[in-house]
């Protein structure tokens, strides 16, 4: 699988209308770029989804434990703050249900062409969340992933598409104000 850079094209906005220095203020440095690799085959994409699968444990009886252990398909275990447990379950369900709906559609080829990069993007988001958490050792309860939290913020507002036009529309409706709220205090996105 090709490596994808997490570097955006522009910096954070200072106003909703943009400026000559930043004509695309919705492109925030904390966003994971949405990519469309036309050279990726369907088999490669499905293999990527399977390779990056993970499981979220059931709620434990001891809620004083600040971290939860996420089991990745490759056998690695990633620690995350407990507050990510339910949102991560939602994101995983969203990814796999989206794939199921696409593959069981009346015209699966057309649906796959329309939504394949959206499904891959959700998987990439989770993968990058895990990479950030691994790099943040020792991880503390208060640790946050700005990248993942931005997506969760949009999910809470029922903005489930992560394409540029959707992020742009969200920006023009809410600006950066919604991203300042600790999204993990809410629990499940929908």
Image: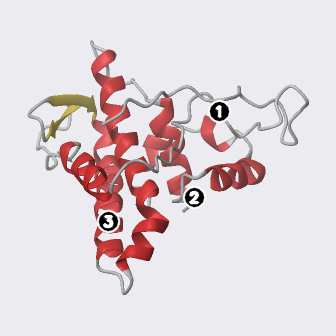
Q: At numbered mark 1, what does the secondary structure look like: helix, strand or loop?
A: loop
Q: At numbered mark 2, what does the secondary structure look like: helix, strand or loop?
A: loop
Q: Badge 2, how many Cα within 10 Å: few under 14, some, many 20+?
A: few
- Whole-angstrom CA distance, mark 2 to mark 3, is 22 Å
Q: Nearer the viewer, residue 127 or 48?
A: 48
Q: Point out which mark residue 73 bears.
A: none
Q: Is residue 102 visible?
A: yes
Q: Badge 1, how many Cα within 10 Å: few under 14, some, many 20+?
A: many
Q: Badge 3, how many Cα within 10 Å: few under 14, some, many 20+?
A: many
- Whole-angstrom CA distance, mark 1 to mark 3, is 28 Å
Q: Earlier in the sequence, mark 2 or mark 3?
A: 3
Judged from this view, the residue extending furthest toward the right is 20
- Residue drawn 43% across and 73% down? 111
State which quadrant residue 17 falls in: top right
Side (left or right) of 172 relative to 133? right
Q: Point out which mark residue 99 bears.
A: 3
Q: Residue 2 location, x and y as percent?
A: 36, 33
Q: Residue 142 location, x and y as percent?
A: 39, 24
Q: Residue 146 location, x and y as percent?
A: 50, 31
Q: Is residue 187 visible?
A: no
- Whole-angstrom CA distance, mark 1 to mark 2, is 18 Å
Side (left or right) of 103 relative to 15? left
Q: Across the whole image, how many numbered discs are drawn on residues?
A: 3
Residue position marked by numbered label 1 in the rendering: 28
């Amino acid at each position: 699988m090709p490596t994808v850079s997490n570097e955006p094209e522009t910096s954070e906005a200072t106003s909703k209308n943009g400026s000559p220095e930043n004509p695309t203020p919705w492109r925030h440095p904390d966003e994971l770029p949405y990519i469309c690799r036309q050279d990726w085959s369907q088999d490669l994409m499905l293999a990527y989804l399977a390779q990056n699968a993970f499981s979220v444990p059931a709620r434990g009886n001891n809620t004083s434990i600040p971290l939860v252990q996420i089991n990745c398909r490759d056998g690695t275990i990633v620690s995350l703050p407990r507050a990510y447990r339910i949102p991560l379950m939602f994101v995983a369900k969203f990814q796999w249900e989206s794939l199921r709906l696409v593959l069981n559609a009346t015209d699966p080829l057309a649906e796959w062409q329309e939504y394949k990069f959206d499904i891959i993007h959700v998987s990439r988001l989770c993968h990058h969340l895990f990479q950030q958490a691994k790099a943040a050792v020792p991880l503390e309860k208060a640790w946050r992933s700005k990248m993942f939290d931005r997506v969760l913020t949009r999910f809470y507002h029922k903005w489930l598409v992560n394409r540029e036009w959707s992020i742009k529309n969200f920006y023009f409706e809410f600006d950066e104000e919604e991203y300042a709220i600790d999204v993990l205090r809410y629990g499940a996105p929908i």
